[in-house]
Structure formats: C-alpha cells, structure tokens
C-alpha cells in the first residue's frame, strides 16, 4: 500500500474521497530550499519568484512567504489569493498581456511591488494610474528575445509573433515603453523580463536567452543611454512526468544560469546587478499526484479502457498538449503489469483520455489509480465541464494531512445562479 509522507493513499481516499489531489508538502519545501540555496551568487543580487499560475491557493502562497520568496501573479484573482494569504505584496510581480484597468487599480491599492509591463499601451495606462498611487511602483518591461525553446507550440512564448511582450525586432516600441516608464514620477524602471517557454529540458535555450538579453542591454545603453539593473529570465524548468523525461537538476540549472549571466556581464560590460527567475511547474509538479477511483472497464477491438471518476475537468493537459503521465494502482505495485490500458475520464468528450497507453496490473472497479506529477497546471486549469465538482486538495507532511482546498459541492457550483 503506497504512502505519501507517512500516510497511506487508501486512508487519504477514504477520508477525503476521490478524485483527490495530494501534495507531499515536504517535497515542495525541499524544492523551495533548493532554489533558495542554489540560486545565489557573489556577483548578483538574486531572487526566485514562484509562478503561482502553476498552482495558486492560500496554502502554497503561505509556504512561499515562509521561504522569503517572491511571487508572480497574473490576474486580480491571483492577487486576491495572495492578499488573503497575508502575503507581503511588495514582493509580488504582476504579469499579464492584458491587465484590465480594474486589475491595475486593484494591484495598486494592494501596493503590488513590481509590474511586469507587457506593451506600450500598458505603460501609458500605468503612467496615468500611478499619478496619485502614493508609492514608487517598480517595473520590468517584458521583451521577447525570439528564442525558440523546444516544447509544445502552445507553451512556447517567445517566438516573433507571440502575444507576450515586445519583440526585439520592434526596438522602437521597446524604447518608447522604456521612456514612458523612466519618465513617470511614481515609476521606477528596473529592467527586462523574458520567458521563453515551459517544460524546457535544454539548458542552451536559457543560455541563448541570457546572451540575447545582455546584448540588448548593450544596445539600450550605447544607442539610447539607458542602463538597467535587473533581468528576470522567467521560468520554464522542466519536471519529470515519465521515465522519458530528464529535467536538469535544480542546483545545476541555477548554477548554469548564474554562471552564464556572469560570463555575459564580463563579455558585454553592462552593469546588471540583479537576476531573477520565476519557476512554477518545477516547484509543484512532482510533489502532487491525483488519486482517482477506477469505475467501469471496456474492451474494444484495439484497446482496453479503464474509466476514472475525474478526467479533463481536473487535468486538461493530456487533451490540450498531448501531455504524458505515469500512474500506478495503489496496493498492486508488485503485481505484474500485464495489460495495456487506456485511462479515460468521465467527461462527454472523446478526447478526455488521461493516459493513452500504460501497462498496469488488472484493474478492478474500486481500485485507486494514482496519476503522478499532477501538481502543476492540473487544479489551476481545472474546469466545470459537465458540472463535475473540483476535487479536494490535501497537503501531507510528516505523517499529518490537512485539507487546503475543500471538495466542491453541487451547491457551490450553482451558488451564483439565479
Ligand atoms: N513566468 C511567466 C511569465 C510565465 O508565463 C510562466 C508560465 C512562468 C513564469 C512559469 O513557467 P513554468 O516554470 O511553470 O514552466 N499550462 C501549461 C504551461 C503554461 C505556462 C505559462 N507560463 C502546461 O500545463 O504545460
């Protein structure tokens, strides 16, 4: 019988029901410590932001606060969650390609420390909104260095036609935005932000990004007389979903990034003093799993299906990105995996397949199917399709479990309906 941090999956399923998202809190803590300990440098001031889009709730924000880390928020809702968690909002970075006026006001009311400005129009709006905001708002400008990281095309964010940031090919626009930010009394312009994609295995993609950013900092300095202090390199560090995945270990990726930055600083001579990164997935993905209960099975000429009590409503990633996952049957870990199953959800959609093909021991109705590495972009991208209630989320640590998000009820789902 499998355990998570000293509690059996069976006990968790009996106590909280299924589908259930379970996080091993100790694993999150050890990854946070690892980023904190390894993303340090004698040359630069450094900082790690947790990209809360990967999994946002009060409990995780409190952990981020406990570890003294920065927070990346992309919407009024993520700001609200952080405020509710008691997070020090001066350490929050507000991202997004289309922040609404209401969200900008809300962020300023809550004294969000840094805005990551996406385009010239946002710079104009921010200039207007900060006139009487009562504090100095730090800003980074999101630029697009045009680095293609080899990942799913929906997740790539820095190609030339990306909806995010201003591309290096539009140098005039970058300069226009920088000047707007520099010439606003309540705005401090710190530097650039870029994010080149997600689930990146190849360190050279980050190396390329860093080189391009330093080279652009040279252009800004020499051609336009503007110096910057900060580069935020974004997130994108891969997680291990199946045996085929070999992410770069956290300590190595941290070292590689900071060494590359140091080399580029020497090569280009620009005086960057602060380097930030903002991992999301790599902090929470592997610490989480989803426990489902097996329902009916079905044989077709070419497949054996096992149906589970959740599906694309709690994990859209297989349907949206053809993402692959590993799973096991709780209590049958040592039985021979003789049958190839297709693990399908219960939504009314043929594409609601969680795992296309996986060898498992014979699955019986009532078995607990545990899908691994579901901690990032699972719950956060969940939907109410077919009016399936969102699962409960539990943190387990050193033999203690605690509910961090209640299971949704039918009443919750209709509470806003007239
Ligand atoms: N910073 C920015 C500006 C981002 O856009 C993202 C992710 C991150 C940081 C964090 O990236 P991470 O370290 O988690 O790769 N829903 C997709 C992933 C979308 C990522 C969007 N941006 C998925 O489930 O694979």
Image (cartoon, helix red, strand yellow):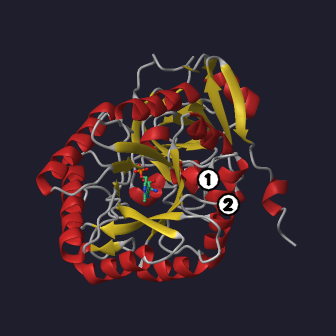
Q: Quadrant of residue 246?
A: top left
How many badges with numbers are in the image?
A: 2
Picture coordinates of residue 31, whole percent (x, y): 45, 32
* Vertical position of residue 31 compared to residue 50: above or below: above
Decide if residue 246 is on the left or right side of residue 279.
left
Q: Secondary structure at mark 2?
A: loop
Write down the quadrant of residue 258 in the picture: top left
Which residue is painted at 54% across and 34% down in the image?
Answer: 67
- Helix, strand or loop at label 1? It is helix
* Residue placed under numbered mark 2 in the picture: 110
At x 54%, y 65%, the residue is 137
- The reply to whether residue 399 is visible in this rendering is yes
Q: Which residue is mark 1?
A: 89
- In this view, the residue farthest toward the left is 267
**Residue 91: percent from left, percent from top:** 55, 50
Mark carried by residue 245:
none
């Amino acid at each position: 019988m499998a355990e998570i941090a000293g509690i059996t999956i069976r006990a968790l399923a009996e106590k909280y029901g299924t589908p259930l998202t379970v996080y091993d809190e100790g694993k999150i803590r050890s990854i946070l410590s690892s980023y904190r300990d390894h993303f340090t440098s004698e040359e630069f001031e450094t900082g790690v932001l947790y990209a809360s889009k990967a999994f946002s709730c009060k409990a995780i924000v409190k952990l981020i606060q406990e570890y003294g880390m920065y927070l990346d928020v992309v919407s009024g809702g993520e700001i609200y969650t952080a405020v509710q968690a008691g997070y020090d909002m001066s350490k929050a970075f507000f991202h997004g390609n289309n922040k609404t006026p209401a969200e900008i006001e809300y962020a300023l009311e809550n004294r969000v420390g840094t805005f990551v400005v996406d385009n010239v129009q946002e710079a104009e709006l921010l200039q207007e909104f900060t006139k009487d905001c009562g504090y100095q708002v730090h800003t980074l400008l999101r630029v697009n260095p045009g680095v293609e990281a080899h990942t799913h095309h929906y997740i790539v964010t820095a190609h030339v036609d990306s909806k995010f940031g201003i591309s290096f090919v539009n140098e005039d626009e970058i300069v226009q935005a920088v000047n707007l930010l520099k010439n606003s009394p309540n705005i401090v312009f710190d530097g650039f932000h870029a994010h080149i994609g997600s689930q990146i295995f190849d360190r050279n993609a980050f190396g390329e990004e860093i080189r391009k950013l330093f080279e652009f900092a040279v252009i800004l300095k020499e051609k336009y007389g503007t110096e910057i202090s900060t580069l935020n390199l974004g997130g994108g560090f891969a997680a291990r979903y199946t045996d085929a995945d070999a992410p770069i270990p956290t300590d190595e990726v941290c070292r590689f990034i900071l060494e590359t930055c140091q080399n580029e600083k020497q090569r280009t001579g620009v005086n960057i003093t602060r380097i930030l990164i903002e991992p999301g997935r790599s902090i929470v993905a592997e610490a989480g799993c989803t426990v489902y209960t097996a329902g009916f099975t079905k044989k077709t000429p070419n497949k054996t299906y096992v149906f589970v009590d959740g599906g694309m409503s709690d994990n859209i990633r297989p349907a949206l990105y053809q993402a692959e996952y590993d799973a096991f049957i709780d209590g049958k870990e040592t039985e021979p995996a003789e049958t190839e199953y297709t693990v399908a959800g219960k939504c009314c959609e043929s594409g609601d397949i969680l795992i296309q093909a996986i060898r498992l021991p014979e699955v019986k109705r009532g078995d607990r199917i545990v899908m691994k590495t579901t901690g990032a972009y699972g719950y956060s991208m969940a939907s109410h399709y077919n009016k399936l209630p969102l699962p409960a989320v539990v943190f387990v640590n050193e033999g203690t479990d605690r509910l961090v998000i209640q299971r949704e009820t039918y009443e919750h789902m209709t509470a806003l309906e007239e």
